[in-house]
Image (cartoon, rainbow, N blue to C red):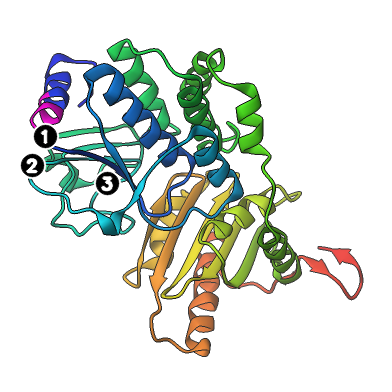
Amino acid sequence: MTIANELGRGRFLSTIERSRNIYITTHINPDPDAIACAFGMQYLLKKALRRKSVIIQSGVIGRAENKALISECGIKSVDASTVTVTSDDCLILLDAQHVNSNYPFRRSVRPEIVIDHHPLRAPTYTLPFYDIRPRYGATAEILVEYFKQFGIPFSRAVATALYYGIKTDTANWSRSTGHDIAVCHSLAEHIDDKMLSRIEYPELPVDYYRQIHKGLTTAVRYGSIITVHLHALPSPDYASLIADFFLRAEDVHWVFVTGRLADAVIFSLRCTRARENAGDVIKALVGKQGSGGGHSNSAAGKIPTAGLTEAELEKIEHELVAKLLKRLHGRIIVGDLFIDTASNRTV
């Protein structure tokens, strides 16, 4: 269902028009694609339908680039814990679906509108309006089409945010399609280059360098696979940040990074070759212990760990690596430290 056809457009408009309040939310710990979509949707509703809306944020904004995106664009949001969504309100969910574990509300709080680029989940069929396009590299691409359908020009800030959201979700277009690139080309003339530069190259906190150091000193290489256990994380974003960092290593095709939050072990998986789907691999690793999923080249998951001992946490991390090696290599193999500090050698 899309607003490109009369039925979809009618459902979208009627859902908005009959609502008392409009709330916009994304998955927990939003990434640039999710942040940009929320900002873009709020602007679109204001300009196209003259409706005010509130952006609801849940989780942690940890990466310096994400903080810069919010600051540069002047994005205002409220915490999910402060909002009560009623049946008279319209909740718009972007870059996620309400049956996912990263949905910020209880399952009983159902969104009226869902726009996402992840694979369609069956319960989403029951919602008043949904637009799911898994062939798109980023949900921001769908928002760009909505602007065009409604004939609303982009502001510099909105165009820059959407452009950055697409760029990051496709890893600088390294896992993009022709459509992803075409959408970015259509946005290019509207973006603020200086704003984009400030978002992409913000000042970095000391924690960033601590996590890089921890990753470099603990990374283990198994042929074309690198695994890293970061243990305690200052922010959940660092698992994916370190995974992206190591994926650029020569002759490395898979990177698996784990980290610990207060009540969960989280993990991020990246790959450069689509022999196996990263999302499917994560689901196989997690099993019934937790939740996870993603795309062909990137995925993430988590396992609840409240009350577990240090030994139990380490067991979970080691079992995840063992499952990964069996899945990708067919057997458990012996690895070497990525950087052998004793011999000053990189394996």
Does dot 3 land on a helix, a strand or a loop?
loop
Q: Quadrant of residue 226?
A: bottom right
Label 2, label 3: how many angstroms apart (C-alpha)? 20 Å
Residue 104 visible at all: no
Under mark 3, the amino acid is Gln
Does dot 2 land on a helix, a strand or a loop?
loop
Where residue 294 sits in the image (x, y, percent)?
42, 49
Under mark 1, the amino acid is Ser
Nearer the observer, disc 2 or disc 3? 2
- Magenta segment includes 66: no
Label of residue 97 in the image: 3
Instruction: Please give left or right for residue 140 compared with residue 49 in the image.
Output: right
Q: Are marks 2 and 1 in contact (CB under 8 Å)?
A: yes
Label of residue 19 in the image: 1
Q: Earlier in the sequence, mark 1 or mark 3?
A: 1
Q: Neighbour class for label 3 at 10 Å: few (<14), some, many (≥20)?
A: many
| Prevalent SS, magenta region | helix
Label of residue 88 in the image: 2
**In front: 54, or 98?**
54
What span is colored magenta in the figure?
A: 14-18
Q: Say which quadrant the N terminus sits in.
A: top left
Does dot 1 land on a helix, a strand or a loop?
loop
Under mark 2, the amino acid is Asp
Q: Say which quadrant the C terminus sits in.
A: bottom right
Label of residue 277 in the image: none
Q: Quadrant of residue 223?
A: bottom right
Where residue 127 sits in the image (x, y, percent)?
13, 40
| Residue 101 vertical position relative to residue 96 in the rendered view, above or below | below
| Residue 139 vertical position relative to residue 184 in the rendered view, above or below | below
Where residue 21 sits in the image (x, y, percent)?
16, 38
Of all residues, the one furthest to the top in this rendering is 151
| Residue 142 vertical position relative to residue 226 in the rendered view, above or below | above
